[in-house]
Image (cartoon, rainbow, N blue to C red):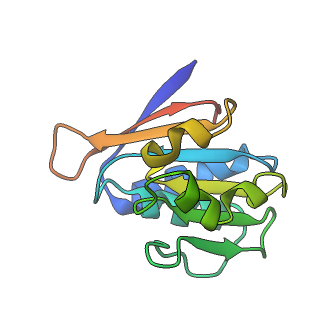
Amino acid sequence: MGFTFYSNSAQETEAFGEKVAQALKGGEVIALYGGMGMGKTAFTRGLAAGLGIRDGVSSPTFALVHEYPHGRLPMYHFDMYRVEGWDDLDSTGFFDYLDTGAVLVIEWSENIDGALPEDKISITIACGSQEHERVFHVEGVQV
């Protein structure tokens, strides 16, 4: 059972991420789906803030993963945009992070869908009817 959230700005998207963070207990895998410019990193910034992480959050496009260990829960932020197969995925160290009890946030989850746990939190982000509106369809967590 899921729900839909509508955002009209990066600030609203970040506030939504903060709200989702309050429902997390550790060990969750948050799979983000959506194209360029949909707000995946803005959502993750809010999620980090909601977890008490004060480090600046940026997209890990070139690093593949950014680690944020200093919050209520540690968070690992992955960018799977360039991952094209199991060998690429294994080289990110992704599987080693699954059992850490940390929150894993994965941008471009569509590229590794078969490797994600069944109990993941899925967040699909799409354009809304207005230029700056984003529609978040959320499965796997209630806020």
Query: On the rendered image, what quadrant is the C terminus found in?
Result: top right
Check the image and report above or below for 37 versus 5.
below
Residue 123 as seen in the image, left or right of residue 8:
right
Q: Quadrant of residue 78?
A: bottom right
Q: Is residue 9 above or below residue 74?
A: above
Toward the top, the furthest residue is 1
Viewer-closest of 14 and 59:
59
Residue at far bottom of view: 55
Residue 29: % across, % down: 67, 46
Please tell me in which quadrant of the rendered image residue 140 appears. Answer: top right
- Counting from the top left corner in percent of width and height, residue 110 is at 43, 43
Residue 76's spot in the image, x, y percent? 67, 65
Residue toward you, 77 or 83: 83
Q: Is 3 left, or right, of 38 in this rendering? A: right
| Residue at image coords 65%, 37% | 120
Question: Whole-percent x and y of residue 5?
Answer: 43, 36
Point 61% across, 41% down: residue: 115
- Corner quadrant of residue 124: top left
Residue plotted at (81% across, 64% down): 72
Quarter of the image for the N terminus: give it.
top right
Q: Is residue 86 left or right of residue 135?
A: right
Q: Residue at x 76, y 52 (%)?
A: 98
Residue 34 versus residue 51 in the image, above or below: above
